[in-house]
Amino acid sequence: MEKEDSEVSGLRLVEDRENAENPSDIEKQFVNFIFFRVNSDWRKLNLETKKVFHSEFRKVFKEFNKELLLFSYSLVGFDSKADLMFWRIGESLDLIQDMTARLYRTNLGSYLETVDNYLSVSGEKALVAPDIDVQNGDRKRVCVGGKKYHFLYPCAKNSDWYQKSVEEREELVKENFMVGRRFENIKIHLTHAFGFSEKVYIISFETDEPKDFLALAEEMRQTSASKFTLRGMPIYTCRLRTLEECLDSLG
């Protein structure tokens, strides 16, 4: 018996464009968290040289502010691995790469080392700037970058996770979100990383009160989904600052 035309060697062919469902009106966004550590030689430079290098770096950063959502965070005093984090959101991977390359070509960039770099895509909601008027109950957009603290948690799953059906996995993820919803002053962002790296999700939490995040983290540790999470992944604590403040904190 001949196979159906829609199947070749077990692969299902994509439907013709004219027969496909209308695409979602929310475009997927690329989401990037890049962490830097400054070389100790930076602190040996004199103050005037640092000011000149700061100005050059800020100028390049601001050039991309028109096409990317950009947020800068300081980790100084919080983490030994990294001093600085940029959260970048946009519709073009090329812009993210071009910006990184331009920053590295600055004088300050020669003193920066990338510690971690996470790439993912947004889900059903578009991530928009904190000054955008988003009404309560808006199912298509969510404001980001408006809270003082940002906790980043790259999430990888063990092999047992992939033995479960898609529906079972979705229920486990939903359970975590139901826990999170009890903490109204914490915004939880889940973006999808699988395919870009071995990570499955990049989960981040925005809040003005770190103690509430600690309480949420303790509760989420008790959920069923936590049993499938690989341990040893870094968790970063980041403080929202202007770029100038972030650079000044480098010493």
Image: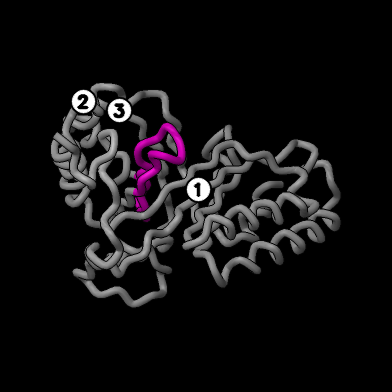
Quarter of the image where one finds residue 52: bottom right
Task: State the quadrant of the N terminus.
Answer: top left
- The residue indicated by pointer 3 is 229
Which circle's residue, 1 or 2, is located before the other in the chain?
1
Q: Can you identify the residue that label 1 sits on?
A: 33
Q: Residue 31: x, y in percent?
A: 45, 53
Q: Is residue 46 visible?
A: yes
Residue at the spot 48% in from the left edge and 62% down from the top edge: 90
Q: Nearer the viewer, residue 231 or 73?
A: 231
> Real-space Cα distance between discs 1 and 3?
20 Å
Q: Is residue 153 visible?
A: no
Q: Type of residue at label 2?
A: Gln
- What's the residue type where badge 1 is placed? Phe
- The magenta-colored residue range is 191-210
User: From what the image shows, is residue 6 above or below residue 146?
Assistant: above
Mark 1 touches mark 3? (CB < 8 Å): no
Q: Which residue occupies the foreground of this view, 1 or 14? A: 1
Is 194 in the magenta? Answer: yes
Q: Which residue is mark 2?
A: 163
Confirm or deny contact between disc 3 and disc 2 (CB under 8 A): no
State whether residue 182 is above or below residue 113. below
